[in-house]
Amino acid sequence: MNQTLLKKENPAEVSQPEESKSSSLVEDKKSEFDCRKYRQFAVTVYLDIQNVLGHLLKDCTEQYPPCPTVALDRLIFEMNKRYSETQLQVVVSPLILTTSDDPNHQRLSAHQHLHTGFLMLSGLQMRGDAMFSAEERSLDEETLEYAWLVELTVGTLSGKLTTPQLQNIITALEAFVFTVEDAENSLRHPRPYLYCYHGTPQPQCPQTTSEHFCPTTDTIKYKMVRASLDGISLNLVESGTILCFQMQELLSDPLIGMEAAHYFGTIVKDHNYALTSHTHANIRLLHKQRFFECVVGPLVELFSTTNDIKTKSCALVAIASLLPWLPHIVLNAHIQKLLPVLLQGLYTSDFSKIGEVSINLERHDARCGSETRLSTLTTLASLLKQNASPAERHTSTLISFLMPLTTYHPLTVGVKALECLAALVTLPVSVILPYRNEVSFFTAEEV
């Protein structure tokens, strides 16, 4: 009895088990949080694959050309993932794609080199940078990706293909894109809804209204893509066919305009190292005349319509480089069209007479004017020697332009001016009778 009463009268002894229970519960709750579950990870990946050989798959039979083959020298993938940023890089060097013609397609022995075509990419580099933020995010939620930056650097794309080979590559690429974007066979996400940027399902977010859902992370993410291409050198060839590009567009380039103008003559020039049957070039009959007929009209129009002085010079040099290598019978049909252009070019070789030219460019313009004037005089002399009759109505203008140039420096310009004047001597002499008043026949006394 006494012992029982003592236990009831001592409150400290009675409350001691309850306090121990509450403290044990708190300790159990604290022990549930494990910081190892929320620690930051840093992942570094480096993957280097060499000598890769693959195929662009497509439907093909024995009657169709085989699938294009892709040869990759090296593929490098690097990734550095941190808590607030992910950096990745892909490097491809170099990539060669080869394709062939239909096995049943027959070619001449001189054109067997066209049976196989190729495309080569000198290099490709892709760098990406993803940025993440944990602002207003709980530990159980994923970080928010707020920016995605991509820089793509493509090397030089070069190749030689025929039209069927190009169609074969396009067919294979279409099959690849169709397989990647096939929505019918794509996997469905087990979650029927999307999470907004607050980390909650879109229908349950307080920011969702009856008009629109709260946007997802991909919708508000800042994206930037910067791409660059070094160059394209693609030749589309076929036996007995030539694809003529509009080379006159290069004349407007301030860097290579004059070089392109000089190389117009290379196409029609007779030489032993280019555009011959020994270099697998298919030289057809009247190829010079065909090329000249295609470009002379656009060149004359470019010279007449452009306001850029240097573009005028390039167009004039291009015309001058073509004329020395063409037959006289072809040039005679275009003298009426070319002579006004050459006369205008002879006058506009002085750059200070056209438009507003900066005084700071005086030396550069003088050098360009000398080159243009020499090319103009060379072409004009060759035309006048062949047939000077179309210049009969421009005789006074020609003489007024040519006489000051006979003492021009360099000496080559003066020599060409003298050649033009010598060609004008062959023109018939025009007899001009002066007008005389009838009163002059009478003397003052007779009057």
Image (tube, helix red, strand yellow):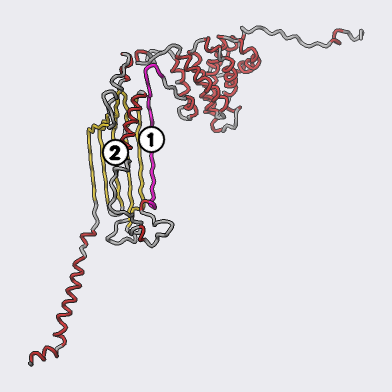
Residue 394 in sight in this render: yes
- Residue 402 relative to residue 271: left or right: right
Nearer to the camera, 159 or 3: 3
What kind of secondary structure does the magenta stretch mostly adopt?
Answer: strand
Whole-percent x and y of residue 69? 27, 29
- Residue 76 relative to residue 215: left or right: left
Residue drawn at 83 percent across, 11 percent down = 437
Quarter occupied by the N terminus: bottom left
Is disc 2 placed on a helix, strand or loop? Answer: strand
Residue interval drawn in magenta: 219-241
Dot 2: within a 10 Å radius of its alpha carbon, few (fewer than 14), some, or many (20 or more) residues?
A: some
Residue drawn at 24 percent across, 59 percent down = 38
Which comes sooner in the sequence, label 2 or label 1?
2
Please give the count of numbered marks on the rendered protein.
2
Residue 91's tag is 2
Residue drawn at 61 percent across, 10 percent down = 389
Label 1 sits on residue: 229
- Residue sitting at the far front: 184
Whole-percent x and y of residue 410? 53, 18
Whole-percent x and y of residue 359? 57, 32
